[in-house]
Image (cartoon, rainbow, N blue to C red):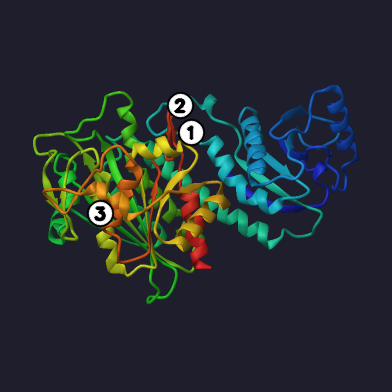
C-alpha cells in the first residue's frame, strides 16, 4: 500500500474512489473552503439517526451529492482528540475501507494533519495485513485498496513536519510488517539459518554490516550457556551481528539484543501440548530487532546501532541439556539449569556479555521471556526492567509516543536471592514468585558494565485465539527510542 500527502484547496471536489472525512464530536466539517453542503448533510444524518460523530463511528455513503468522490466515509472523532482517539478513528476507517471495492482513498481532517501522518501508515498496514506465505488465497479475498493520500487543507504546500512524519511512519510500518512476517512463519520455515539469511539480505540491501557466527566461532568465544540450549536440536545455532552506522566511528553505539528461539518445546522440561504451536513466536525478540533495523536503515538517523540475535531451537533429543546440568557462560559464571524451559535467559546472557565489547551507550534486550509477565501485565504493556532511571524514562516515553506501551517493573537485588545455587554461581530460575522479576535479575548479572534495560514481550508480541498472529511490537517503541537518542 502506498501512502502520500498533498495540498488540496477544495478537498470535497477531489475525484477519488473514497473520501474519508473525520468529524469531531459535536461539530461538522467546518473549516473547509467548501464545507456547507457537507455540514448540512452531516446535520441531516444526525437528525435522522444515521450518523452521529461518536468516537469510532463510521458511515459509508455511495455517490453523495456533497462531494465529487464515488464514496464518502464519515468517521466520528472525539471533540478534543488525543493520540488514542485518532488511532481508534483510523482503525474504524481502515476496517470499512477493507470491505469496499475502492483502490484509492483520500483522508481529510481540518486539524491533526501531523498526527494523521504519524499514525496512518501503521494503522492501515496493521488492519490490512494478512499472512499469505503458507496459504493459497483466492484473488477475491484480496482487499482492493492500493493507495492512501492525506489531504493538507487550505494551503499551497504540505507542511514539512507532516511530510517528515509520514515518511518516518512508513518506514516504521515496513519494519513492523517484517517483524510480523518473520514471527508468523512456522518453525520449519523460520529456522536459525533462515533468520541469519534474512539478516544478510537486509544488510546487503541497505548497506549494513552483518556477520553470522556458527557453532565453532561460538565455542571459541566460550558461549557455553547459549550452546547448551542448542545442543538438543539438529538445527545449527546462529549468532547474528548487525551494524548500522549513521554517526561517527568514535560514537558509541546503542545495542539491541533479541531472543531468537525459533521453536521452544521447553526441552526436557517439556511444555504442555496445548497451544505449543505458539512457541514459534518465541523468536519475536529477534524479529523485532530485524524490524527495527529495517526501519532505522530507511530513516537513516545520525546514530550507531548494533543488533545481536541469539538464534536456536530448544528441543528435547538425547543430547539435550537436563535439569541439574551446570554450564559455563561466556562471562565465566557457571549456571545450574534447574528448568530447561527457562532457556531464553541462557542464550541472552552470552549475547549480553558479547555486547560489552562495543562499550555501548545503552543496551536493550527484547525477549518473550516469561509467562509470569503475561500474568502480571496481560496483552497491554510490555514489561520494562532496568536500574537506570533515565533509560527507563526514555523507553517509557517512546512507548507512550507510539501507543506501544511498556510498564516499569521492580528490579532489586533482594529478588536475586531466589537465584542462589548450591552447585553453581547462579541458578537459571528462582521459583514461581515474581518470576518475571527474577528472570530479569538473572540477565542483570551479565549486564553490569553498561546501561541496560530488558523488555519482556511475552504478552505483547502475539495474539492468541481467532486473531492468532504476531503484532510487530515493540518495533515502534524501539525505533522511537533510538530516534530520541539520535536527537
The circle drawn on residue 201 is: none
Whether residue 447 is visible, yes or no, is yes
Q: Residue furthest left?
A: 318
Quarter placement of the N terminus: top right
Q: Which residue is drawn at 56% across and 50% down?
A: 400
Query: Which residue was labeled with disc 2?
Result: 137
Q: Residue at x 36, y 38 (%)?
A: 372
Q: In this view, does 447 lie above or below 319?
A: below
The label on residue 130 is 1
Task: Say whether residue 291 is left or right of residue 55.
Answer: left
Q: Quadrant of residue 213?
A: bottom left
| SS type, badge 2 | loop
| Residue 152 location (% of width, % of height) | 74, 52
Mark identifier at residue 349: 3
First-in-chain label (3 vs 2): 2
The answer to which of 352 and 121 lies nearer the viewer is 352
Amino acid at each position: 500500500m502506498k501512502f502520500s500527502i498533498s495540498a488540496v484547496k477544495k478537498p470535497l471536489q477531489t475525484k477519488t474512489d473514497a473520501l474519508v472525512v473525520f468529524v469531531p464530536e459535536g461539530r461538522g466539517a467546518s473549516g473547509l473552503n467548501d464545507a456547507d453542503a457537507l455540514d448540512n448533510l452531516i446535520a441531516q444524518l444526525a437528525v435522522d439517526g444515521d450518523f452521529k460523530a461518536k468516537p469510532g463511528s463510521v458511515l459509508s455513503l455511495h455517490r453523495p451529492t456533497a462531494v465529487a468522490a464515488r464514496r464518502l466515509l464519515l468517521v466520528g472523532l472525539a471533540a478534543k482528540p488525543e493520540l488514542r482517539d485518532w488511532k481508534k478513528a483510523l482503525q474504524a476507517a481502515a476496517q470499512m475501507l477493507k470491505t469496499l471495492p475502492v483502490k484509492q482513498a483520500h483522508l481529510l481532517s481540518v486539524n491533526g494533519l501531523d498526527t494523521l501522518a504519524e499514525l496512518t501508515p501503521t494503522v492501515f498496514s496493521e488492519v490490512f495485513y494478512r499472512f499469505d506465505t503458507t496459504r493459497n488465497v483466492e484473488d477475491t479475498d484480496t482487499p482492493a485498496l492500493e493507495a492512501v493520500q492525506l489531504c493538507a487543507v487550505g494551503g499551497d504546500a504540505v507542511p514539512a513536519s507532516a511530510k517528515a512524519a509520514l515518511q518516518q511512519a512508513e518506514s516504521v510500518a515496513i519494519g513492523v510488517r517484517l517483524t510480523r512476517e518473520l514471527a508468523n512463519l512456522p518453525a520449519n520455515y523460520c529456522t536459525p539459518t533462515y533468520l541469519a539469511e534474512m539478516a544478510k539480505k537486509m544488510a546487503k540491501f541497505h548497506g549494513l554490516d552483518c556477520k553470522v557466527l556458527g557453532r565453532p566461532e561460538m565455542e571459541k568465544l566460550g558461549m557455553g550457556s547459549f550452546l547448551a540450549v542448542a545442543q538438543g536440536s539438529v538445527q545449527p545455532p546462529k549468532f547474528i551481528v548487525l551494524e548500522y552506522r549513521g554517526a561517527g566511528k568514535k560514537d558509541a553505539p546503542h545495542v539491541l539484543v533479541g531472543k531468537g528461539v525459533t521453536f521452544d518445546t521447553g526441552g526436557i522440561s517439556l511444555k504442555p501440548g496445548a497451544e505449543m504451536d505458539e512457541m514459534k513466536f518465541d523468536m519475536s525478540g529477534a524479529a523485532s530487532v530485524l524490524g527495527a533495523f529495517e526501519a532505522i536503515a530507511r530513516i537513516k538517523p545520525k546514530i550507531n546501532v548494533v543488533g545481536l540475535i541469539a538464534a536456536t531451537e530448544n528441543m528435547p533429543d538425547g543430547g539435550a541439556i537436563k535439569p541439574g546440568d551446570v554450564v559455563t557462560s561466556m562471562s565465566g559464571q557457571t549456571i545450574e539449569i534447574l528448568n530447561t524451559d527457562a532457556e531464553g535467559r541462557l542464550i541472552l546472557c552470552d549475547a549480553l556479555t558479547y555486547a560489552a565489547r562495543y562499550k555501548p551507550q545503552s543496551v536493550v534486550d527484547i525477549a518473550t521471556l516469561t509467562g509470569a509477565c503475561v500474568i502480571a501485565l496481560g496483552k497491554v504493556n510490555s514489561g520494562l526492567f532496568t536500574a537506570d532511571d533515565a533509560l527507563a524514562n526514555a523507553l517509557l516515553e517512546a512507548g507512550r509516543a507510539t501507543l506501544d506501551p511498556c510498564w516499569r517493573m521492580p528490579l532489586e537485588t533482594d529478588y536475586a536471592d531466589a537465584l542462589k545455587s548450591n552447585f553453581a554461581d547462579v541458578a537459571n530460575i528462582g521459583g514461581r514468585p515474581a518470576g518475571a522479576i527474577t528472570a530479569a535479575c538473572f540477565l542483570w548479572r551479565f549486564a553490569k558494565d553498561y546501561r541496560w534495560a530488558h523488555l519482556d514481550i511475552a504478552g505483547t508480541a502475539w495474539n492468541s485465539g481467532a486473531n492468532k498472529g504476531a503484532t510487530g511490537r515493540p518495533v515502534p517503541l524501539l525505533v522511537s527510542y533510538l530516534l530520541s537518542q539520535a536527537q
